[in-house]
Image (spheres, helix red, strand yellow):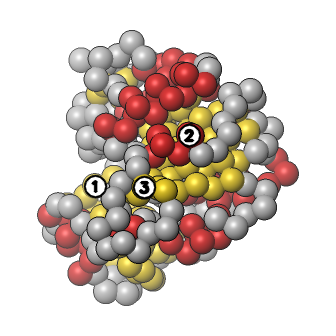
């Protein structure tokens, strides 16, 4: 069995399988099948001590239905609650919308190695996201906007299948009008003829904005099929392998590198990732 080459335990508890009890305090629809849930730990001291790195994930358990990993999507500077954005695609995720405000769930984590926040200080940041891949990037965007002087130029390229499936529409309307950042959005199709923006896959936005690799880190998260096309665009622009970051959130189960469900080559996605530089994974078959 492969072993983690660089295990990074981000859990705040001695027992990595120990749950904290969290209460649902708000549920906000994002799309027809996706909700933004706000939780708060029942133990006030645990909530106050809670912290995470953008790009890390939590294991959420609905008692009697199971557990699954979800990226934390709230601001890392927010200490009174945390948010998970969840799409209903399976047994567990179809159970979560049945929760009532005040219901209790189990939470463990955060786990994993997130976006390289220390390395991003003073750098220009290019974000390329597709669909629900915006979820683990949202806390990074919020961190940059809340501490703008610590970072360089911010460019956000976001794509969705159709206008109805765009996430965080309130955030998008704010990002669209930022004076100290650049935001561009596209949809694959517009069946309702209500979209006035770009139509095409997210890589078509590279022709709409000026992207330069100098002192810039590219952060990518979206459907796996998107990655190789984004990679080609970044390589054409001259991005070095160690400044292209990809989130490989897939097949994670235990969160602590024991079950082996998430192994890609010799890497445990849940512990060595989910964020990797292209330099780390370019020789691993099937990584992208």
Q: Residue visible at 20% across and 72% down?
A: 95
- Locate the N terminus by quadrant: top left
- Judge left or right: residue 159 versus residue 66: right
Classify mark 2: residues with Cα within 10 Å, few (<14), some (14-19) or many (20+). some
Residues tagged 2 and 1 counted as in contact (Cβ below 8 A): no
Q: Quadrant of residue 31?
A: bottom left
For marks 2 and 1 on the same chain, the one whose residue lies earlier in the sequence? 1
Instruction: Give how far across and how far down residue 168 sits, in percent.
Output: 49, 69
Q: What is the distance, in whole Å, between disc 1 and disc 3 at their CAs? A: 33 Å
Q: Which mark is residue 68?
A: 1
Q: Which mark is residue 260?
A: none
Instruction: Give how far across and how far down residue 78 sits, in percent.
Output: 64, 67
Specify whether residue 131 is in view. no
Residue position marked by numbered label 2 in the rendering: 206
Residues tagged 3 and 2 counted as in contact (Cβ below 8 A): no
Q: Nearer the viewer, mark 2 or mark 1?
A: 2
Q: Residue visible at 70% across and 67% down?
A: 177
Classify mark 1: residues with Cα within 10 Å, few (<14), some (14-19) or many (20+). some
Q: As rendered, which of 89 and 31 lies closer to the eye?
A: 31
- Judge left or right: residue 253 versus residue 37: left
Instruction: Give how far across and how far down residue 92 sits, in percent.
Output: 20, 64
Q: As rendered, which of 86 and 160 lies closer to the eye?
A: 160
Callout 2 secondary element: helix
Q: Which mark is residue 199?
A: 3
Count up the numbered dots. Answer: 3
When the figure is inspected, residue 146 is found, relative to residue 251, above or below; the finding is: below
């Amino acid at each position: 069995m492969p072993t983690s080459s660089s295990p990074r335990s981000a859990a705040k508890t001695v027992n990595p399988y120990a749950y904290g009890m969290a209460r649902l305090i708000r549920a906000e629809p994002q799309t027809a099948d996706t909700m933004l849930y706000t939780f708060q730990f029942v133990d006030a001291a645990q909530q106050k001590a809670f912290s995470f790195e953008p790009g890390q994930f939590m294991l959420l358990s609905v008692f009697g239905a199971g557990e699954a990993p979800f990226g934390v999507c709230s601001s890392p500077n927010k200490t009174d609650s945390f948010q998970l954005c969840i799409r209903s695609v399976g047994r567990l995720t179809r159970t979560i919308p049945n929760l009532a405000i005040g219901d209790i769930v189990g939470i463990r984590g955060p786990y994993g190695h997130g976006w390289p926040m220390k390395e991003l200080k003073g750098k220009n940041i290019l974000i390329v996201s597709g669909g629900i891949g915006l979820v683990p990037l949202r806390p990074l965007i919020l961190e940059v906007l809340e501490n703008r002087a610590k970072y360089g130029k911010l460019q956000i390229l976001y794509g969705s299948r159709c206008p109805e499936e765009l996430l965080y529409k309130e955030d998008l309307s704010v990002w669209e009008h930022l004076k100290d950042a650049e935001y561009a959005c596209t949809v694959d199709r517009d069946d309702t003829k209500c979209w006035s923006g770009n139509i095409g896959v997210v890589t078509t936005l590279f022709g709409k904005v000026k992207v330069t690799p100098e002192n810039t880190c590219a952060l990518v998260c979206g459907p796996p099929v998107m990655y190789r096309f984004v990679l080609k665009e970044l390589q054409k622009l001259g991005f070095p392998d160690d400044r292209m970051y990809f989130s490989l959130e897939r097949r994670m189960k235990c969160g602590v590198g024991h079950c082996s469900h998430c192994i890609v080559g010799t890497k445990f996605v849940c512990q060595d990732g989910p964020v990797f530089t292209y330099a780390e994974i370019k020789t691993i078959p099937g990584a992208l």
